[in-house]
Image (tube, rainbow, N blue to C red):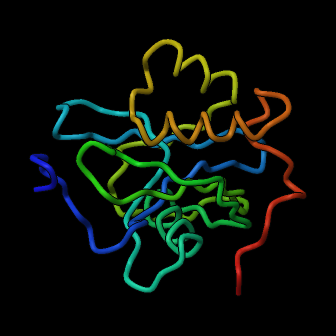
Amino acid sequence: MRDGYHVIKEPRPVNGVVILPILPSGDLLLARVYRRPIEAYSFEFPRGASDPGESLQETAARELLEETGYTAASIELLGYLHSNASLLSSSVGVCRVLIDGEGQSGTDGEASSLHHVSVSQLLAMVRNGEITDGHTLSAVMMAISRSPDRLSIAGDVAARTSIPA
C-alpha cells in the first residue's frame, strides 16, 4: 500500500514484451486468443513474460516462436509501455520483429488461430473495435509515431537491427 493505494510491485522493472510481427510480404501477424477475464476472443500481437536473465530481444524471439511457430530475422525495440500504471509498477517492451520466412508447425497452443493482415486491414480492425487489446493498440501507435508515412507500420526493413548471436 502506497499513500492509500494498492500497488503491485513486480521483481523486474521490465517484465516482458509485446511483438509487432512483420511477415516477409509486409503483412502483419495477429493471433486470435481466448481471454478468460473478458470471456471472449481477442485479436492481439504476440506477447509474453521474460525469463530471468533474458534480454527483451531474446524474449521477443522466443515468444514469437512459441506462440506462432515463426522465427525472427531482426528485432527493433520501439519503446516501453505501462500496462496499467494505476496498479502495476513494471513496464513491457514493444518490439517490431521482421519474421524470417515460413512458419514452423508447432506452437504452444495459446493462439486459436493466426491471421495475416495488411496495415490498412489492421487499422480498419482498430477503427471498427475488433482490436481492443491495450498492448496491441499501444504497439500500433508506437509504430505509427515512428514512421514518416503513418501507414508504414512495417518501417524500413534495412534499418532494423539483427538479433545478437
Q: Residue at x 9, y 47 (%)?
A: 4
Q: Residue furthest front?
A: 3
Q: Position of residue 145 (x, y in %)?
A: 71, 35
| In this view, 30 is above or below 41 | below
Camera-side residue: 157 or 145?
145
Along the horizontal axis of the image, is 132 left or right of 3?
right
Q: How many discs mark residues in the rendered view?
A: 0
| In this view, 2 is above or below 117 | below
- The C terminus lies in quadrant: bottom right
Q: Residue furthest right?
A: 158
Q: Residue at x 19, y 58 (%)?
A: 8
Residue 2, quarter of the rendered image: bottom left
| In this view, 97 is above or below 53 | above
Q: Residue at x 44, y 40 (%)?
A: 44
- The N terminus lies in quadrant: bottom left
Along the horizontal axis of the image, is 71 left or right of 33?
right
Q: Position of residue 63 (x, y in %)?
A: 47, 65
Residue 41, quarter of the rendered image: top left
Q: Residue at x 69, y 30 (%)?
A: 118
